[in-house]
Amino acid sequence: MISPIIEVENLVKVYPGGTRAVDGISFNVEPGELLGFLGPNGAGKTTTIRILATLLAATSGTARVAGFDVTTQAADVRRRLGLAMQTPTLDAFATGRENIELYGVVLGLRRADIRRRFDAIVQFAELEDHIDTQVRFYSSGMLARLGFAVISQLDPEILIVDEDLAVGDFAFQAKCYEVIDRFHVGGGTIVMVSHSANDVIRLCDEAHLIENRRIAASGTPFDVIRRYQPEFAAGSLKKTAITGAAGEIR
């Protein structure tokens, strides 16, 4: 029997001042699985995956990723895990160029590798005209594109995505889907947060709904979306029935 690559049990995170962001979350992720988290803003999704990515320390509970205990922060555990977090911790007063190098080093790339891949990263992000601008002047979409572009040049064992993929036009979204699909088909494990029911149905093998800092539902993407967004699920079922009757589904 294959052991889970991610094991989380009774995870709790309380911020200074007593705000409880995560309250007893437990789940497992199998190797090669693509798991999606859905839920309203403030439910605890991002806190959960930032603990997995070693960007936050948990207050209590356990989280093991590829055999490593990541409940507390560790300086180099991300590199040892082969772990990549899509949303970087950026220096707002540094340029896009400088942040590519910073983020690459955080993810374990050597500076020579970053320089060799730099043009491909900038081209993927479609930020050629803004790469020497301080990122404090970037929009949220530009920041997301920059982070995803760096990820597109990596080959991690586990990828954590904390942004909707709708951060650009159709062509850019298609590039993001291609990266996710290639990584998944190659056996990589992915944990993603999304507000897009379409993305979760399109990409994920399993989904969890987080509400009020706890997992409220788990199962197939469609079953979880039916709980979270019943109007979307009902519309999808109706559309499927109509197109199926017309013989348009291939």
Image (cartoon, grey):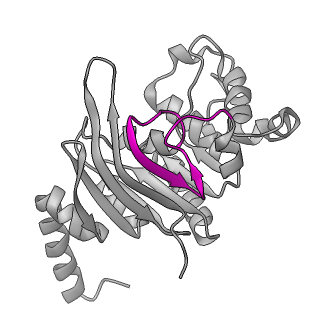
Residue 223 vertical placement versus 106 (above, below): below
Rendering coords of residue 178 (x, y %): 57, 60
Give 85 or 52, whichever is nearer the viewer.
Answer: 52
The part of the chain drawn in magenta is 53-75
* Residue 201 visible at all: no
Q: Residue at x 69, y 17 (%)?
A: 132
Q: Residue 221 lies in magenta, yes or no?
A: no
Horizontal side, residue 154 vs residue 135: left or right = right
Residue for point 60% across, 17% down: 91
In percent of width and height, residue 158 lies at: 59, 56
Percent of width and height locating residue 38: 29, 52
Q: Residue at x 27, y 17 (%)?
A: 17
Q: Check if residue 54 falls in the magenta segment.
A: yes
- Tell me if residue 138 comes above or below residue 28 in the rendering: above
Q: In the drawing, does residue 93 fall left or right of residue 48? A: right
Tell me what residue is drawn at x 83 percent, y 37 percent. Answer: 110
